[in-house]
Amino acid sequence: MEPPLCILVTGGAGYIGSHTVLQLLLDGYKAVVVDNLDNSSEVAINRVQELAGDRALNLSFHKMDIRDKPALEKLFASTKFDAVIHFAGLKAVGESVEKPLMYYNNNIIGTLTLLQVMTAYGCKKLVFSSSATVYGSPKEVPCTEEFPLSAVNPYGRTKLMIEEICRDIYSSDPDWKILLLRFFNPIGAHPSGKIGEDPHGIPNNLMPFLQQVAVGRQPKLQVYGTDYSTKDGTGVRDYIHVVDLADGHAAALRKFSDPKIGCEVYNLGTGKGTSVLELVSAFEKASGKKIPMEKTGRRRGDAEIIYASTAKAERELNWKAKYGLEEMCRDQWNWASKNPKGYQNEDDVVN
Ligand code: NAD
Ligand code: WQD
């Protein structure tokens, strides 16, 4: 029997990373997580181990910053990685505007360090977490992978730059296989309610904010803009269940066995647009909680309407999102109600 393939997952303790690591373990891979726990908790790793049952033995965790080149080299020297899934990075748009150097340092230097060490150790398969943010405010929808790219904030620029760096690396050395996955808006949690999103500080994104209003950690939701040219005047996004996103990563790893693959881009979304008010209403239904709302002005830099064309991922990755809004909200609420303080206090978990 072939030994299991070994995947390095940077940022694997985070929201999308933890769900993906679980999926990899269940699919029979070995997963090595490196994370500096800047926006996550080691409890997430323990919970993934719990959920993985016997397969937990195939998971190891290293608290490490990917900018620490000697530490990364030591890891690559001791382990042969078949591929790397790179989630590690900072992701808060507003914070990136306030602290651009911190974002360029973490996201760009972190990625360069990783790519240098991968090159040195001959590991040339990478899956990178890009974002729908690289489409800026698209002129039309759905967004196909060929749309023009733009960025309106430092966070988005780091994603654009890293995509370009990857394209340059591939054109300099066609032995590389690089999959750039552009995630739309991940929400929801594992159906067990054991792992989910637990952002540090006040959340910027709609769903984690909604969740905190529902559990009483925030008084009300501010709806940013009610005068857009959309079905009800509020912004439209493509929300995707985080478990579907994890599944998309498993599909990406399978794609590496295609000899024709070079550096490719794929959207990971559902292809469906949902307005802010529609999401609030689906969440109210799932949670049985009324969400107090205040309609306010538009948030600077927000796109009016954005959702994915899913055709390329369906055709070439053989992957399609399975879950709808109802399941996303159900699983989000299951996680929120079982872990009202996130991973903060293990004893608070309601079984
Ligand atoms: P997250 O913050 O939960 O996970 C990122 C993880 O990376 C965290 O655990 C953090 O501690 C770790 N990390 C950050 N800098 C690091 C460093 N220098 N060294 C080691 N670890 C480091 O975020 P997420 O939502 O799981 O996002 C994962 C990736 O997907 C990010 O690159 C993000 O930009 C991208 N993305 C996220 C979304 C979204 O809406 N959540 C959408 C599109 C793309
Ligand atoms: C969704 C909708 C808001 C909060 C961001 C990043 C993007 C990507 C995903 C990483 C919009 C509205 C929000 C609130 C609101 N992340 N809203 N009240 O803006 O699509 O994208 O996360 O790559 O890069 O920019 O997501 O969840 O912030 O907003 O009315 O308190 O909810 O205006 O219409 P967004 P979001």
Image (cartoon, rainbow, N blue to C red):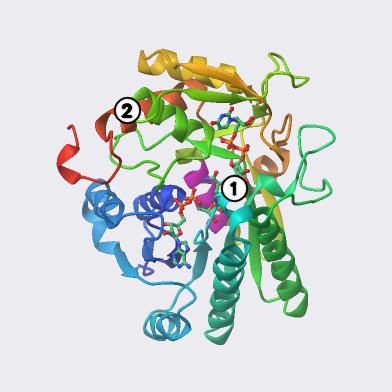
Q: Earlier in the sequence, mark 1 or mark 2?
A: 1
- Pick the front one: 268 or 200: 200
Where does the image place residue 47, in percent across and percent down from the top left?
25, 49
Asked if one can make out residue 60 in the rendered structure from this viewpoint, the answer is yes
- Report the quarter where the C terminus lies: top left
For the image shown, how many numbered marks are present on the structure?
A: 2
Which contiguous range is marked in magenta?
245-254
Q: Which residue is drawn at 59% across and 76% down?
A: 115
Residue closest to the eye, 155 or 326: 155
Within 10 angstroms of label 1, few (less than 14), some, or many (20 or more) residues?
A: some
Task: Determine which residue is flagged by label 1.
Answer: 94
CA–CA distance in space, label 1 to label 2: 28 Å
**In the rendered image of this protein, does residue 116 appear above or below residue 40?**
below
Please identify the quarter of the rendering in which residue 271 is found.
top right
Relative to 69, is 108 on the left or the right? right
User: What amino acid is labelled 2 in the image?
Assistant: Asn
Amino acid type at mark 1:
Gly
**Left or right for 7, reference 311:** left
Q: Is mark 2 on a helix, strand or loop?
A: helix
Mark 1 touching mark 2, by CB under 8 A?
no
